[in-house]
Amino acid sequence: MAKREYSFYPGCSSQKKASAYNQWVSTVSICKELDIQLNEISDWNCCSASIGYAGGGELPRLVLSARNLALSEKEHPGQDLVATCAACWLATREANERLNHDAEMKTDANEALKEAGLEFKGEKKVRHLVEVLIEDVGYEEIKQHVKKPLADIKIAGYVGCQTNRPFGIAGESFENPVYLDKLVEVLGGTPVENYDKKVSCCGGALMFSEPEKSQALVKDILEAAYDGGADMIVTPCPVCQMNTEVYQEHINKKYGTKFNIPSVYYSTLMSVAFGQSAKEAALDGQIISAKKLEAIASK
Amino acid sequence: MTNVVATNQTILVVGGGISGMTAALEAAECGKDVILIEKNPSLGGRVAQLYKYFPKMCFPTCGMEINLRRIKSNRRLRILTLTEVTSVTGDTGNYSVTLKLSPRYVNENCTACGACANAVTAEFDNEYNYGLNKRKSAYLPFAMAYPQRYVIDSRIIGTEEASKAKAACPVNAIDLDMQVQELKITVGAIIWATGWKPYDANKIQPYGYDRIPNVITSVEFERMADPLGPTGGKLLRPSDQKEAKNIAFIQCAGSRDRNYLKHCSRMCCTATLKQTTYIREKYGDEGKANIYYIDIRAIDRFEDLYQKVKQDPTVTFIKSKVASITQDKSTGNPILNGVNTEGYQRYSTPYDLVVLAVGMEPSVDFTQLPINITLNESGFIEFDPKNGGQFAAGCASDALDVNRAVQHATASSLRAIQVINKVAGAEA
Amino acid sequence: MSQAVEKYRNTFLREVEANVEEGQWVKMCMQCGVCSGSCPLGPHWEHPPQEIFMMIRANKREEVLTSSSMWFCTSCYNCIARCPRELPITHIMHGLAHYAQRQGLAPKELPTAKFAKRFWDNLLKKGRVNELQLGLQLYFMNGLAEGIKTSLKMQKVGLGMLKTKRMDPMEALGGHGCKDIKGLKAALNKAKQIEETKAAKALERLQSKS
Amino acid sequence: MADKKFAAYLCKGCGLGERLNINQLAAVATKEGKIPLIKQHDLLCSSEGVALIQGDIDSEQITHLMIAACSKRAKTEAFNFENVAMSRANLREGVIWVRPDTEAAKENTQEMAEDYIRMSCAELKYMNIPAPSQEQGRIPHILVVGGGITGMTSALEAAKAGYHVTLVEKTAALGGMAAQLHRRVAYQSPFKDPQPTGIADLAKQVQSHQKIKVHLNSTVADTSGAPGRFAITIAHESGGTSTENVGAIIQASGFKPYDAQKLTEFSFGKSPDIIDQLGLEALARQANGGPIKRPSDGKEVQKVTFIQCAGQRSQTEGHLPYCSGHCCLTSVKQAMYFKDANPEVDTLILYTDLRMPGFGGENFYRSGQDKGILFTKGQASSVLPNGGDLTVKFKDLILNEEVEDTADLVVLATGMLPNSGIDIEAIPLKVEEKKAGDSASEEPVAASPPETLVPVESVLNLSYRQGKDMPQLIHGFTDSHFICFPYETRRTGIYAAGPVRRPMDISQAMEDATGATMKAIQALENAALGRAAHPRSGDLSFPRFRKEGCTQCKRCTVECPFGAINEDEKTYPVFNEGRCRRCGTCMGACPVRVISFENYSIDTVGQAIKAVNVPDESSEKPRILLLACENDTYPALDMVGMNRIEYSAYVRIIPVRCLGSVNTIWITDALNSGYDGVILMGCQKGDNYQCHFVKGSELAHIRTSKIDDTLKQLNLERERVQTYEIAITDLARIPQIINEMETTIQRIGLSPFKF
């Protein structure tokens, strides 16, 4: 029996060979280290992120999440539902709260779910893995697992939007959450102080439809990290990670900048600090390689 | 031991700010026995920290002086400072109240000569100036403080500092052995004039009060404008002590906002109008005031002040709730970001200094006290017959300006007298 | 000014309340503008949220529903977090976009509208989103020539993703999916049906009253 | 009065003993002050010190004592002796704290202290212990003028405290404006819905209360007397009169609505569907919860537009410059009438600033929004009847466009005008010539001249020399000018309450009524004891007048800021002690110096001035007299001392009750005695006056401006007398002014009047 067990909703981007596959890999490795067992919901579906609205109405979109919750309730009773993807977590938590708050809506959702032979009860807590790490495991315990402190690495904690608003991590402010900074410190690194773009939007899903407008936002985020002397950016969100990492060349071309800064998941950071291998930390998943982490991992 | 004579024909007034002083004096000057308690070492409350009053731009110390003179010449009124209520039991016309008296460590021998302050070195944040400067650990809270007696900060008790203060006193006024006392009294009616406190600006995260040095609160600005304040009346930026000339005011900072205070704090609009005149007073045409507002609530004849300020070409009004404040790292200038909703114009404007017109919240959380009283959603005391012989006066009842608070306190005084007269069976 | 009679009536507001996600909140806006100032893509909005709310009250149905503005919502939730009146602005924007689309009034050539629609369709197919298919569709949504141009521009990104095993070319052909896709589809169809029935009823109620 | 027995006590504490030669000061008190009993003490304010003094009072029957220690504002709890006259020589804040502790400064500092001893002794000699005025008695009875919600509340609150009330209402029923309302704005949590006005119930309570006597169809025909002995003549419509003696008066004469006919741009009067807020109340009462119908054709209103600030907050001629405070709340309430009856009705409120303050206001606004009221920040420019409908033109300030909209009904949120009676300070009005009642008959006439804004009927009919009604503050309202003292009026014992005092809503008016009742009760209780009302509350002194010297010049009657002094048939002043605030303005005004107070007189100050030792010319030590208003300047001087800010050792300071009490004889006497300069410091005057007695500072400025003639006669430079307006915060400025006078004297030379 693992020390802690959760019902797990990986989401589309964390599937094998999807854009956040590296998050999945590193998450698996840190959970192993911390003795956390993530039980995947067997037949989960997409949450529609925050972009399904053109086609899907309010109720259909809620039903998507209600289905996942219903499955989790059925398969993993008593376990909190945990997600690693910001959008997945947000959509699921939102659906959970709204359906529990609005009896009529809940009845409607269940009427729809009946078609799939499911029922949403609304008895689960929906949590982000970061919450599990901070609240259930705690900084102290994480610190005890640090074998290779991330010495001399300056890291900009980019929290982004959806892990931060409208729910956020308990006790953190919307405008200046500090949990990533604290985590960086616990892992032996140096957080960038006053990183004032830490909760700015990267464009999210609009990177696909409005790339230029979104890249302008990413440019500011990267610039602020550079101004703060960051060696790399750390983020909890797959969309943030991808948007800050993969478009740097486009941005450089457009704005004449010379960005080349790695953007990593907090799970990758932790994995490296826990002394796990580059592969376990999914460092091979970096398009812009995190050389300083690689150096530590290979020590 | 402090001795207090009180009966069920005595009125207890809790809070020695302008409302409490008024309520107490009106009753005492009507021949009633009144006990006025104040948790701080001196009377005066929030108004003692104001530089000027709107709309006349007169000085609160002036009214304080009159009220102090009334207090000094009234034998019906007993004042206890450093005193708080810890419990209330009983009912209309017969309340049993427990008071907690904290030690001042200075007795009535004190002549306010200041020798103790000269002797000590330890300093603490000056509460009177909202922490904008330091004060000694033996101190007179402010120039007009009444009782005009020094205070020894309890944090130095038991240290060498305290002994130094004691040794320096030429009149043997320092008594370091003073202890907390508990006092039980009987009173007929209670007036809660517990007042307000400025909303904690740290909680208004988008405005970065906790992160951007040149973002300050309206109460701090008020101290800054005061020639007797921490900056000698200069409007100095905290980041570099440079004079701030182009200043933005953000209205409803914490008020009318479900994230913070749901209610409108009423006085902030007029207070800001007043504060723009400070800028004019210091710089003439060289200064600039920029007011970001939702509605300018300059009610009744305060409208005159609004019209006057509107005429001033150095004052600009922008209908907008500022979305966020960022900081220009090279200059330290706060940058206001948002949208002027009148005609939709986006702005990102730097200023030398930003003043948050912070809202008012009740200074006492009555839900945390063993006191049975009806509160509204914002924690203000509601007028409710169930409150019996307990009445709110001033800002304990709602966000009020000084004038209205005094008016309300005067009314509360009569309500208490009605209870007392009934107890006394007084037929006119 | 012949249309004067239409203005500042509740008609459109009621329609929004009946049809738009969280539409009942629109009336609570007090025009402070904090949402408009908080939006990351704000400068691209012809009408920022607070103005859209005012337009709804001014009965500007056509202008609102044909607007491109709400399609610039990145779902960053800044507006919600800061709104002093508790308006779930993000959701209202999504709801308005959805309703505009349903009414056939959404601007046809808007990239986000197309993308959002395709996202949903992609999702519907297998219950999970196929990033590559979605991406390819996206690049070609503006026609073949544009698509090839975009593909080339994005080529390096794609290669990077491939190399780091964060993209699977095989996904273009099939890929992940829900096992009970039938059940999921049935549930979604039912949900859609419930929603549309309710909206129709609400509209009927409205029309019978006025 | 029993024999005066004098004693002086010199304190050596707070450094006085080290800095000053106390024995020498004692010698001055003995030799020059002629005080028989003199004691020194190490710390006079200590319990031993106080006991020492009290012991002497008890055993030696001391009646007059001089304390030479700190400022008279300090240690008041310690030096608090009953039934004695006391003067205090301020050696601490006034001498050692403002002088450098150097050998070089010592001589001048000691001279300063010695002079203060001389001055205090001289003052004490001429002081008497005041006995209360017996002119009035205790009449636990209050007159309330006005039977609206304010008046009724006042009456009930006074009765609840055990006082009798006579309520005079000029109409046939109680209720006033509030009786015309359908509902009132929510006044308690959760502040969501319009509430019953409760007027009928209130009226019933008033009418059935044993302690309240109601006169309907009646007006106040005459008010004479003073607090504690007001005599009221009440005229009844039936023709008869009755009289009543009351202790105090509450004026709750309310307001009248602004005449919307003046708003031609909004076509008021051109269509019955364009109404004001009271008009809508009538419609709502008619509908009584059902659908509201428009007056023109009885059609159910489907769309109503409210125009806020109609004719208000505007500098346009004929408009009201102020905000009436309640109209936003009222319009929201009225829109709720429609919404509660039928949520489908469109209700649009056009506002520029929505003023719904406090906890309740904001909740009520939210509730209005929740009910579906549309709010638009918009500036209305016109309303025009258009067929059956109305066309409203406005600029939507948010959408930034000119809009032409239609409505079934338009409600103009017009303002309120106070029923404050006659503006006694306006330039003599022809209004005064008009007979009461004239105005009512000429009501609907168009093109009204501006002076009809001034009500022509007196409310109180005061038989006061200064006029029939209370002076108005601004825009016709009888508000107090003082932030800290909202019930201050310039007619002692008469308090305004409700919208006559300031624009306000019902909740506020009820609160205001209660506060005013408190003040009225207090005024009558203090009058009974012969005590002054605010701000010298408790003061037992009042002006004593030597009729034989009086020249009937009327200056005292004209200048009294409180209208306390009438004239008898021979035009001698009649003082009305109960009305007097004890400021001393009459004393300052009197050219023949026949007015004084027992403890503050021409002599107490004049002799102190003369007691100062003026050195001869050869010493080159000038003397400067500073007459300092004790309200703001003297506290400021104390704080100067506390902050150890130094100033010239040549100044001698005498606190005065108010600059208005300064009689020019003091100045001429000072100059004649060889003072080189005289400074007067009082409060701010003018429109934004800070003078606690309203006119005192202003009058002093006028009087001293005339002193130029005297200076000319004496062949003295005009710079030798200066008058300043000082604020309590002027800690830096006061020493500067004093030092500048020293410099001036150096420049122009010492006075030639030294002996």
Image (tube, rainbow, N blue to C red):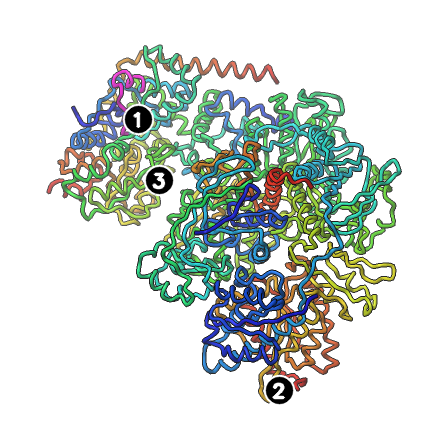
Provide the residue designation for mark 2: D616
Mark 3 and mark 2: Cα distance apart in space? 80 Å
Is residue D229 visible in the rendered image? The answer is yes
Q: Outermost residue toward the bottom?
A: D618
In the displayed structure, B228 sits above or below D258; it is below
Is label 1 on the same chain as label 2?
no
Q: Quickly name the residue at label 3.
A: A199
Image mark for residue D692: none
Residue D560's quadrant in the figure?
Answer: bottom right
Report whether mark 1 lies on the same chain as mark 3.
Answer: no
Image quarter where the N terminus of chain D lies is: bottom right
Residue tagged 1: C136
Q: Secondary structure at mark 2?
A: loop
Q: Is residue A81 magenta?
A: yes
| Spot occupied by residue D612 in the image (x, y as percentages of width and height) | 62, 78
Please identify the quarter of the rendering in which residue A41 is found: top left
